[in-house]
Amino acid sequence: MQGLVQAMQTQAHTQAALQAQLEAQAQVPAQDHGGPSTMERFKRMLPPSFKGESDPLLAESWKREIEKFFRAIRCADEDKVTLATYMLHERADVWWAS
């Protein structure tokens, strides 16, 4: 019985140490290891552009396609607007800039 108690205490101590380590890692900003940026990865996939077509189905289709690219590159939420607006052209780009 004493061995079981000791094993449970050891497990609790290990779990607490792992939790502390995870919390410490969450506070350290991610380092760039020289890999391609999110924008570079996005552009390599050749995402479609959107020119501001008036057909709502075309706009919805473009949005769904862009979201597929975001999932494929595991895009962070804070980067999605930047990447999506990069693909706006012609009327859509003018509208976004106004």
Image (cartoon, rainbow, N blue to C red):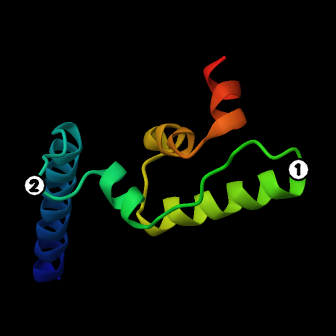
Mark before the other along the chain sequence, 2 or 1: 2
SS class, disc 1: helix
Q: Residue at x 71, y 26 (%)?
A: 95
Callout in the foreground (2, 1) = 1
SS class, disc 2: loop
Rendering coords of residue 27 (x, y %) = 20, 37
Could you tell whether 25 is left or right of 87 in the image?
left
Q: Residue at x 51, y 44 (%)?
A: 80
- Which is nearer the eye, 11 or 75? 75
Q: On the image, which quarter does residue 60 sit in?
A: bottom right
The quarter of the picture where the N terminus appears is: bottom left
- Which is nearer the eye, 18 or 27? 27
Rendering coords of residue 52 (x, y %) = 75, 42
Reading the image, the residue beneath label 2 is 34
Reading the image, the residue beneath label 1 is 56
Q: Amino acid at mark 1?
A: Pro
Rendering coords of residue 93 (x, y %) = 63, 32
- Which is nearer the eye, 8 or 92? 92
Q: Residue at x 61, y 41 (%)?
A: 89
